[in-house]
Amino acid sequence: MSTFQQYNVYPGLTPVRLVSTSNVSGTYNNGQNNNGVGATLTIAASSLTIDSVACAVGDRVLLQTQTNTNEQGIYVVSSIGSTVVLQRAADQQSLEQMKAGQFVSVGAGSLNAGNIYSIVEPLPAHLGIDPLVFNADPSSGAVAFSGPASTANALAVFADTAGNVKAASTTTTLGQALSITGALTASGAIASTAGDVTSGSSGDAGKFVSFPATAANGTFIFEALNAGGAFNTTVRNSVMGQSSVISIPDPGAATSKFVLQDGTNTSGTFTTLNAVNLKYGATPVAQVDPASCTITAAAGAANVSTVTIQLKDGSGTNMARVIPFTVYSSSAADGLTLQSAASTGYSVASGGLSINNGEAITTQIRCVSSATGGCVLSLTDTAKQTSYLVLVLANGIKISAQLSAGSYG
């Protein structure tokens, strides 16, 4: 008979109740003759749940997500006790029974109910030894997920490198940078309704960069630097009665003002008042810092101590202008007790000027420094009394080390 004839054979297999969504771990035995006939997968557990459904004895299941792809195929739950034993289904335990394109439908499961899975080439040369691959054909209008049940508004992510998709149910780490060119909300911002927005992680630096409306006109950057220890810096608003905008001034500007936290008047720490008046004038000029100033005494001529005073700013730099000040002698280290009258008193030796206008000088003198903030005084005291010199400035005092007989010539 020479007429060509076409034969149609229905490729559908007996349906399965469940199909796996992840690896089912167990001990695989490829049958008595190592050819897949009578092959079993023994699971060390007293129950088995596949796709959110508890298996029962007699259930027909498809394992298609095994780590060891030679274990894949259609099984029947043969027993459930101290272990669960799956045995390859009678219609799928030899190569002669398998054809590429055969398909099986799924009856239950939270993800895969109603889906269809097909056997694809290449077929294994040795069943239970070579890979056996089933591909999913999702139901109309649905997507085959390989992870947990889909969640409303969840981010869909790839579950593996095979192209399987799942709904993100926990923290999701993207495998590449996320670049956003359009607005994510009506206001053009990324909104975090609840929770924090994090850049970087512990041991991995990150920064937030905000650009202004005008191109190439500066950026505002939040960046954490290595603090040399486990320190956190938090910038937050205080309780206030209305909305506020805090503008950070240009520190080089003549009118630069910025309110700092209240603190003690020590080098590098300023009270709010000091911070506001830190610099003044058309050209910003630093204030003199009493704590940074120096007072040294050295033996001079007979009964004379040569006292050198140097006025400095908070960074320890010599002042660069004439500054008025007062010096007096105290018998107490805290400077609160005037010394008894010296036999002759003070006089300005160099680098400054006395402004006492010919008054009799005993324990105190009013002066102005030189243009470099320095002044050298001569203190004459025939009794060579033990005392302390107190430098008085508009914003504080500085007390010298103790002067004793050795401080005089």
Image (tube, helix red, strand yellow):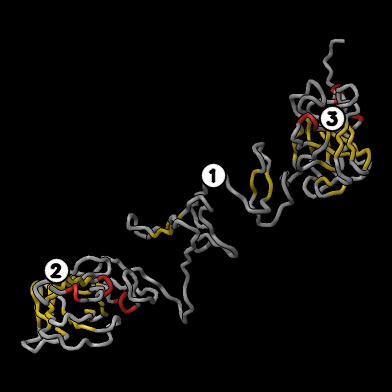
Q: Quadrant of residue 327?
A: bottom left
Q: Determine the CA span between mark 2 and mark 1.
A: 59 Å
* Residue 62 appears in the rendering: yes
Which of discs 1 and 3 lies nearer the camera? The answer is 1
- For label 2, the residue is 372
* Residue type (three-letter) at the residue carrying disc 3: Pro
CA gap, disc 1 to disc 3? 42 Å
Q: Residues within 10 Å of mark 1 (few under 14, many from 20)?
A: few
- Secondary structure under tag 3 reads loop
Which of labels 2 and 1 is toward the front? 2
Q: Is residue 333 above or below residue 4?
A: below
**Residue 373 visible in image:** no
Q: Quadrant of residue 66?
A: top right
- The amino acid type of the residue labelled 2 equals Thr
Graded by Cα atoms within 10 Å as few (under 14), some (14 to 19) or many (20 or more), the crowding at tag 3 reads some
- The kind of secondary structure element at disc 1 is loop
Percent position of residue 171, x then y:
63, 53
Residue 176's mark? 1
Q: Quadrant of residue 258?
A: bottom left
Residue at the limit of the structure toward the left, as seen here: 358
**Residue matched to label 3:** 11
Q: Nearer the viewer, residue 74 or 348?
A: 348
Left or right? Give the position of 222 relative to 55.
left
> Label 3 near label 1: C-beta < 8 Å?
no
- Residue under the point 37% across and 58% down: 219
392 or 178: nearer the eye? Answer: 392
Q: Residue at x 20, y 83 (%)?
A: 329
Q: Amino acid at mark 1?
A: Gln
SS assignment at label 2: loop
> Which is nearer the N-term, disc 3 or disc 2?
3
60 left or right of 197?
A: right
Point out residue 379 in the picture as x, y percentages from the top left corner: 13, 78
